[in-house]
Amino acid sequence: MVDLVPVHDRPLRSHARRNRERIISAAHDALTGTSRDTSLNEIARRAGVGIGTLFRHFPNRDALLEALTAEATSTLCTAAKRLLVSDEPVAALVGWLRELVDHVATYRGLPASLLLAGTGDGECGLAGSYRAIDAAAGALLVRAQRTGQVRHDLDVPALICLVGAVAWLLEQDPESTERIDHVMSVLVDGLLTAPR
Amino acid sequence: MVDLVPVHDRPLRSHARRNRERIISAAHDALTGTSRDTSLNEIARRAGVGIGTLFRHFPNRDALLEALTAEATSTLCTAAKRLLVSDEPVAALVGWLRELVDHVATYRGLPASLLLAGTGDGECGLAGSYRAIDAAAGALLVRAQRTGQVRHDLDVPALICLVGAVAWLLEQDPESTERIDHVMSVLVDGLLTAPR
DNA sequence: ACCTGAACACCGTTCAAGT
DNA sequence: ACCTGAACACCGTTCAAGT
């Protein structure tokens, strides 16, 4: 994209960009740490920015979540592409799903927002992330199903539902990692083809 | 318990009891219908009662949820006892878990509150319900495990986690019954013993 | 073009004042 | 003993006013 903006408002734009970064950084710290339930007003305050500025950059909470997770989501999806050439299709799928659970559980409210992005007809903030995850998971799923070891009556939305549900469990009690692993193993067993 | 209260405050007590019933009834309608996200103030208003009265009867949202669900929970748990003498232990467990999912998904916020009741050390409102469900599920689980068809590395808390997660999915999108059924069948497959 | 922060309509919760 | 509702401290969100 060519830069057509006049030179004289460069400093303003760069200042705005810095504000954006500050908000993202403050939001990351606020939504990731131990006290994850931080208000948007508080995030703006910590970012040293007016609340109006936060809403100017991110019209709603989902837009902020999208910005926060965009980078991690895309690295996760490129990782999926790399896994597509591994020689263990089922292990690749399962391993990636586990990573996805951890990723989605990183920010409070992300499981619900991601699910909503899948259901929602319109363009809610996380629609882009959802599509990226959908594509990555789809490729891994199809390849795993071709081995015959994974149920064929599974589609990507169902898979994302399952991941979202487990991520929500992790969100409810971030301490209970071992229980989540247990639950996840039950779920993975369910994905595998049952003996007829 | 013997009734020791003087006769002259009987009408007051009965009036209080009627208020309690009104609140429960209004809350049921408000939290069950299509617009499930009704505020406590609004519920009090619909019940024709001051907001202070609502908080006097139910100190927090979980206490209200407990009162709302107490009856349905106990009938579900007596149903579990009846299922204990059926001749299909696995089908009994699975069928009951499905009913539990529907029950937990009935009221908005119940999945999260129930999970918290399991984790919480103290006495949050739904601790009683959790114990009842724990006992009922435990009996069904043990019997199903004795057949050898159900994984032995499963305990009741893990089971309730799974139910809560699926109920949360249903809560997020009450329309998607067919998808939930699908997810539930995957989960149930995961509960069954995998071929060694 | 971008930022600010007072202001709005809400939320759950409390508590002095009533009967 | 029980009820009331104004009041409090919050929340997300908007928007007139500034630079």
Image (tube, coloured by chain):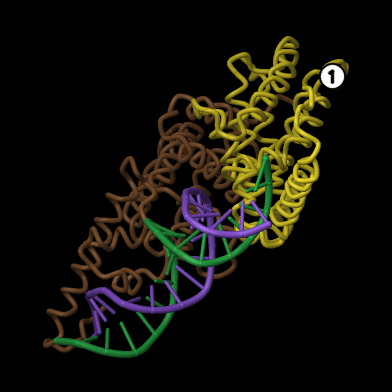
Chain colours: A brown, B yellow, C purple, D green
Total labels: the figure holds 1
Residue B14, position as x, y percentages in the image: 79, 43
Label 1 lies in what chain?
A: B
Residue B40: % across, % down: 61, 55
Residue A141, percent from left and from top: 54, 43
Above or below for B187 versus B151: below
What residue is rendered at 27% in x and 49% in y?
Answer: A29
Q: Quarter of the image for the N terminus of chain A: give it.
A: bottom left
Establish if B154 lies above or below B54: above
Q: Residue at x 68, y 22 (%)?
A: B192
Judge from the rendering whether residue B172 lies leftward or rightward of residue A127; answer left or right: right
Q: For the residue labelled by badge 1, is the local secondary structure a helix, a strand or a loop?
A: loop
Which quarter of the figure has residue A145? top right
Which of the two residues, B170 or B133, is positioned nearer the viewer here? B133
Would residue B81 appear left or right of A45 to someone viewing this image? right
Determine crowd level at label 1: few under 14, some 14-19, many 20+ residues with C-alpha closer than 10 A.
few
Amino acid carrying label 1: it is Glu
Residue A22 in view: yes
Q: Nearer the viewer, residue A187 or B12?
A: B12
Give the image location of residue D12, x and y in percent: 44, 64
Residue at image location 73% in from the left, 53% down from the top: B32
Name the quadrant of the C terminus of chain A: top right
Residue at position x 58%, y 15% in the image? B153
Is residue A76 placed above or below A96 in the rendered structure?
Answer: below
Q: Nearer the viewer, residue B51 or A150?
A: B51
